[in-house]
Image (cartoon, coloured by chain):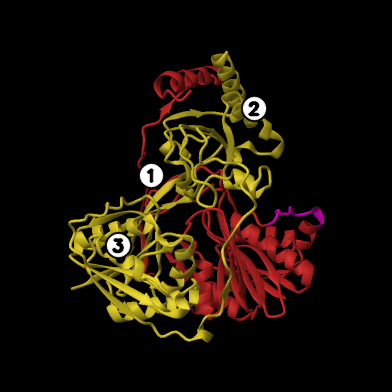
Amino acid sequence: MKIIVAIKQVPDRDAQIRIAPSGKWIEESNLQYALNEPDAYALEEALQLKEKHGGEVVVLSAGPERVGQTIREALAKGADRAIHIDCDDLGSRDALGVARLLAAAIKQESPDLILTGLQSEDLGLGQTGVIVAELLGLPHATLILHIEKTEAGLTVKREMEEGWFQTIELPTPAVLTIQSGGNKLRYATLMGIKRAKTKEVRRVTAAELAVDAASVVVLERVTLPHKQKSTQILSGSPKEAAAALVEKLKFEARVL
Amino acid sequence: MSSILVVLEERQSRIANISYEAIAAATQLAAQSGASVIAVLIGASTESHAAEVAARGVNRVIRVEHPLLAHYTADGFSLALQQLIQKESPAQVVLPHTYQVRDYAPALAARFGQTLISDVVAIGVAAESGPVFTRQLMQGRLNADYRPTGDGPCFISVQAGAFRADAPNPAETSATIATFTPTIETAQIRTKPGEPFRGSSQTVDLASAQLIVSVGRGIKDAENIPLVQNLATALGAELAASRPICDNGWLSMDHQVGSSGQTVSPKLYLAVGISGAIQHLVGMKGSQCIVAINKDADAPIFEVADYGIVGDLFEVVPALTEAIKAARK
């Protein structure tokens, strides 16, 4: 089975986020980046499928130079090779525009299966995988926790809301978006990190893929959210703050 | 007259409240543009809900019916709604931001060369350029305003709880109800969905708990869980968690609070090391009193908290456990 995993580099979860002077995006200088966690689960699922059934795992990522680091991490975890769509204007493309880039690169590879995380931790649009399926004319399923290969194609476990699940059968090639928690994530081994250095990373530019970059949705302004409640922050040493909180819970909120 | 389509979702044989919230969002858009609001029911048999929806202050109700829509599939729903949108040419299509909508709406929008503006929390107006849609970025740390610039229909999905659904008004004149029959062939539906089933048996009943201590990623390691367990025990509270804790297997899945877990509304919800991603907030923001302990003063959890302690949970939690024990003596 040839599997492509579309991964995204996102600001690290613990990074300090500041709004850029333009007011249209976040300040990117000195920002720490990491692999989008749902995509890490997609990669894990792909690696396990390969271990079971053989084949190849190719990671695909779009973005500027710095994305190379995240791609190396995925190779160190066990992906066989990578495709880096080199583009500096990812932020100005909408979800359809980014999906067009990915779909164009995937088309050249004719994979059996395309996996990606259900959403990104930065934009959280949760659409890329579904649009890629639409553009490639492939069936898809979302929020998948488990994949089983069958004679006819795939049987997958889909998460629904409020603790419900569903099994879906679908033919391959197909696109699946992966929900977190289906597997335990692996760490890269020292040997893996060493091997990653010799693995192929093919670079292709957005221009070479010749896709339409026009956006139909524009991000105009980034702001800090309004607080829904006024929070009383209890300060002091841990001991003082704890004592103050107990007082508040007992006599003000009356919940103790 | 231009129109706004609102696609309603049936869940467990009823129209979920989030669908009425989507109607509220559409009504807000209609107030700006003067468009008519058309509620859309979709399935194999939609008659039972049509009258109920017709009394919800919409201008028209359209029942999209076909035997192949009996069970939700992305292929069936996309195809049926694509045909309806082509016929009605609405200015906007408003959907509730549910797991089901996330599964098909991005593809549906792409068929019209559009991008769905997903998980919208507010709608504003810019004088000349029409509506502006606000959605969250960076796990709720920031808000972003999006403006559609295309010519085609604009697709938006609205976040649960972001718009207030109007109560049914018996005095409201009922809207007209029409049926639309899409053309769908069996072969066009490529996925075969199974019946929904419940996950592992629920042994932790958080829904009826009065006091909940909930733990998130900030706890760092499975071996630190007893720290919050001790706090829960001292309080006489149930222990709950955000999704990453359950994903890692540090607590079983039935401890999970949020959109994919349980929805809770205790007297006290004490969030320890939880940043407050929207998927978590929707499961607990109805709590009577919310306390957050987090090292990051900008964490979104503080937007819904009544009381907060900004600090290292490994110092604050033991101190709080002792303070509660002392207060209970």
Please give the residue where the numbered disc 1 appears in the rendered image: A224
Dot 1 lies on which element?
A: loop
Callout 3 touching callout 2 (CB < 8 Å): no
The residue sitting at 50% across, 32% down in the picture is B210
Front: mark 3 or 1: 3
Dot 2 lies on which element?
A: helix
Front: mark 2 or 1: 2
Residue B113: give x, y in percent of width and height.
39, 76
Magenta residue span: A183-191
Q: Badge 2 local density, few (<14 within 10 Å), some, or many (20+)?
A: some
Label the magenta part by its dominant secondary structure: loop
Q: With B133 as the anchor, is A244 left or right in this view?
A: right
The residue sitting at 54% across, 28% down in the picture is B311
- Residue B144 visible in image: yes
Dot 3 lies on which element?
A: helix
Viewer-proximal residue among B102 and A233 = B102
Residue B106: give x, y in percent of width and height.
45, 69
> Given the image, what chain letter belongs to the residue carrying mark 2?
B
Q: Chain B is drawn in which colour?
A: yellow
**What's the CA distance linking mark 2 and mark 1?**
35 Å
Type of amino acid at the residue the image marks with label 3: Glu
Q: With B223 as the anchor, is B25 left or right in this view?
A: left
Q: Chain A is drawn in which colour?
A: red
Please give the residue where the numbered disc 2 appears in the rendered image: B230
Whether callout 2 and callout 1 share a subunit is answered no
Please give the residue where the numbered disc 3 appears in the rendered image: B52
Viewer-proximal residue among B166 and B317 = B166
> Given the image, what chain letter belongs to the residue carrying mark 1?
A
> Given the image, what chain letter belongs to the residue carrying mark 3?
B
Residue B75: give x, y in percent of width and height.
49, 77
